[in-house]
Image: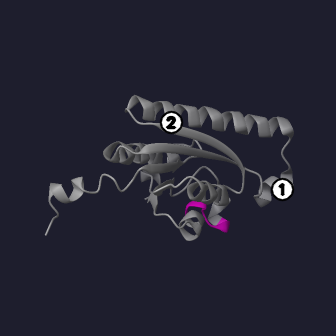
């Protein structure tokens, strides 16, 4: 039996804060749209996080200059600002944050520290190293105590 509209309308208080994790890639844009749609349905505050990776083996091996780190951070700020503005255009409150560190851990920490009700991540971002080490989405699902929605891009099907 399919639940009635009344059933779903009673769920609108369930999601007050939705965290959308993004790396700015095309693959992540599908998760961003899904997260914005979900927030709109529930009238939730949209939190957007972009993490500048510093702990991956390839970063530690090749090294990244201070200027490159500033560029990555600036890109993250632009991506986050754009998504927060898109949330506001939908009549939603938005909060953006750029973190530096291990991507999965920073997402989980933010979700736990800010009372997030649901985390939305893309199945795959722009990194290729994840094919060998496991994806950030997989790590977030494993580590996060909050529900995690993993959105698959049509490119990954």
> What residue is rendered at 44% in x and 59% in y?
149
C-alpha gap between disc 2 and disc 1:
30 Å
Instruction: Determine which residue is flagged by label 1.
Output: 60
Q: Is residue 13 magenta?
A: no
Q: Mark 2 packing: few (<14 Cα in 10 Å), some, or many (20+)?
A: many
Q: On the rendered structure, is 61 left or right of 78?
A: right
Q: Is residue 134 magenta?
A: yes
Where is the C terminus found, in terms of image quarters? bottom left
Task: Say which quadrant the N terminus sits in.
Answer: bottom left
- The answer to the question of whether label 2 and label 1 lie on touching residues, with beta carbons closer than 8 A, is no
Q: Is residue 52 left or right of residue 93?
A: right
Q: Which residues are magenta?
A: 132-137
The residue carrying pointer 1 sits among few (fewer than 14), some (14 to 19) or many (20 or more) residues within 10 Å by Cα, namely few
Mark 2 element type: helix
Location of residue 33 by image quarter: top left
Above or below, 62 against 93 in this view is below
Residue 73 horizontal/vertical position (percent)? 71, 38
User: Which residue is at the front of the view, 94 or 151?
Assistant: 94
- Asked if one can make out residue 29 in the rendered structure from this viewpoint, the answer is no
Provide residue 6's location: percent of width, then percent of height. 16, 56
- Image coords of residue 47 (percent x, y): 52, 44
Q: How is the image coloured?
A: one colour
* Badge nearest the viewer, 2 or 1: 2
Residue at 40% of width from left, 47% of height from top? 34
Q: Quadrant of residue 72?
A: top right
Q: Does any portion of residue 33 appear in the rendered image?
A: yes
Residue denoted by label 2 = 83
Q: Is residue 23 above or below residue 142?
A: above
Q: Residue at x 83, y 56 (%)?
A: 60
Q: Residue at 55% across / 56% down in the picture?
A: 124
Looking at the magenta stretch, what is its main secondary structure? helix
**Mark 2 / mark 1, whichever is N-terminal:** 1
């Amino acid at each position: 039996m399919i639940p009635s509209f009344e059933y779903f309308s009673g769920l609108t208080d369930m999601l007050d804060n939705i965290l959308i994790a993004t790396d700015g890639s095309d693959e992540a844009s599908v998760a961003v749209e899904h997260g914005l749609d979900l927030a709109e349905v529930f009238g939730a505050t949209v939190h957007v996080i972009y993490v500048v990776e510093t702990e991956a083996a390839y970063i530690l091996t090749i090294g990244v200059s201070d200027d490159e780190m500033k560029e990555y951070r600036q890109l993250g700020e632009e991506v986050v600002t754009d998504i927060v503005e898109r949330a506001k255009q939908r009549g939603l409150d938005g909060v953006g944050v750029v973190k530096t560190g291990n991507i999965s851990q920073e997402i989980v920490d933010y979700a736990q520290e800010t009372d997030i009700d649901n985390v939305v991540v893309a199945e795959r971002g722009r990194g290729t190293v994840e094919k060998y080490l496991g994806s950030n989405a997989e790590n977030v699902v494993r580590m996060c105590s909050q529900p995690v929605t993993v959105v698959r891009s049509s490119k990954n099907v």
